Image: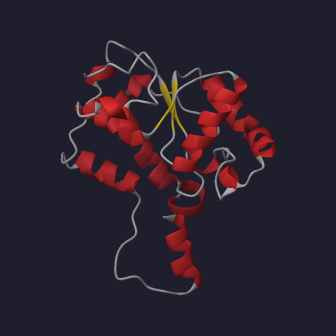
Amino acid sequence: MYAVRAGLQKFKITPKFEIESIIRLYARWIREGRLKVSSDWNRELGVTFTVQDPCQLVRKSYGDPVAEDLRFVVKAVVGEEHFIEMYPNKSNNYCCGGGGGYLQSGYTEERRAYGERKLRQIVETGADYCIAPCHNCHSQIHDLSEHSGKHFPVVHLWTLICLSMGCLGENERSYLGEDLAGVGL
């Protein structure tokens, strides 16, 4: 999404369509009642979550309004009382170190060293899970978790949305920990 937006701006192209983040759409659809999510599945479990604000989506694109939408969606699917904020956050959140092609650059040790700050930030929340709505963030944070030996699960936002709607397939649970792997089956 960021590459499309940046390319259009660079070449001064006015698209005949609106470029929108899926996060903004999720939030809109939940507010409109079109996406019927519920955090009831987590009421008894009490599993806690923190969320990564992707640089390309938040800081470089839509700013704090999309970060607020992200939190709205997260709280709607896991329960407000089970959300733990990172500090700093939103437009001031630390980069995970995986974006902009760095994840595939081949500089694995350098990428992991850069990601140490993000790893510490996540661990300091004490959350059971980290939600990463960006694919690069997800892969980087998952790698940091495993390489460091912390082994906290990193989950895609859509996985939790589907879990909260009771429609997460048995084959779509690979990033869930043992505590959530069987929920709703």
Residue 112 picture location, percent across and down: 75, 39
Up the image or down, 77 lies above or below 7; here it is above
Give the residue displayed 64% in from the left and 25% down from the top: 123
Residue 85 shown left or right of residue 146 in the figure: left
Give the residue displayed 40% in from the left and 48% down from the top: 69
Residue 102 picture location, percent across and down: 70, 54
Quarter residue 121 falls in:
top right
Q: Can residue 63 be seen in this view?
A: yes
For the image shown, how many numbered marks are present on the structure?
0
Residue 62 picture location, percent across and down: 50, 60
Up the image or down, 79 lies above or below 132; here it is above
Residue 1 shown left or right of residue 125 in the figure: left
**Residue closest to the far top:** 44
Give the residue displayed 59% in from the left and 20% down from the top: 126
Residue 49 picture location, percent across and down: 48, 27
Q: Which of 57 and 110 is in front in this view?
A: 110
Q: Which of 144 and 90 is in front in this view?
A: 144
| Colour scheme | secondary structure
Q: Quadrant of the C terminus?
A: top left
Residue 70 shown left or right of residue 98 in the figure: left
Quarter residue 70 falls in:
top left
Residue 37 shown left or right of residue 116 in the figure: left
Q: Is residue 121 visible?
A: no
